[in-house]
Image (spheres, helix red, strand yellow):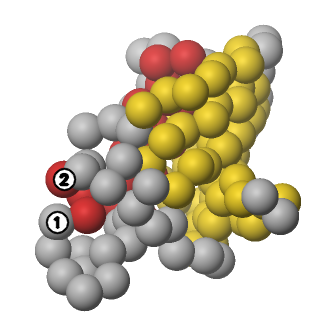
Amino acid sequence: MLPIERSRELRADSVTLILQIDAGLFWFQGHFPHLPILPGVAQLDWVMHYGVSLLAPGKQFAAVDNIKFQQPVLPDSLLQLHLDWDAEKSRLSFRYSLLKNDGEQIASSGKIALC
């Protein structure tokens, strides 16, 4: 299940998306019952979905090169997802930022090798 896409800015080798993280997403069920947070696997799933469909058609997941989860993503958050595609290295870099009234905070970032 994907988040609600609010905007998309597509360039040759990058894309920036604004995503509404609805509290009703099944990803929140059971993770965790008293303090739901968006699992890292959901974040990686969305990186792969948008990265392959928009920047690297036909590519598949090979390995996670580097990943950091810095801030939890709570229900009803507004996220910015920025993806950069390096065709020479076959690497997809990503950064999720939480968008808040007082600015933005990096939620997670990393690099995924594709083949």
Task: Identify the image quadrant of residue 39.
Answer: bottom left
66 or 70: nearer the eye? 70
User: Residue 26, position in %: x, y?
Assistant: 19, 53
Residue farthest to the front, as pictured:
101
Q: Which residue is mark 2?
A: 26
Residue at x 60% of width, y 49% of height: 79
Task: Identify the image quadrant of residue 32.
Answer: bottom left
**Residue type of the residue flagged with mark 1:** Gln
Rendered position, 93 above or below 18: below
Relative placement, left or right, of 11 versus 38 is right
**Residue type of the residue flagged with mark 2:** Phe
Q: Which residue is mark 1?
A: 29
49 or 17: nearer the eye? 17
Rendered position, 21 above or below 74: above
* Residue count near mark 1 (Cα–Cα under 10 Å), binned few <14, some 14–19, many ≥20: few
Rendered position, 50 above or below 34: above
Q: Are marks 2 and 1 in contact (CB under 8 Å)?
A: yes
Relative placement, left or right, of 41 versus 101 is left
Name the secondary structure under disc 2: helix
User: Residue 90, position in %: x, y?
Assistant: 64, 34
Residue farthest to the bottom, as pictured:
34
Relative placement, left or right, of 104 versus 108 is right
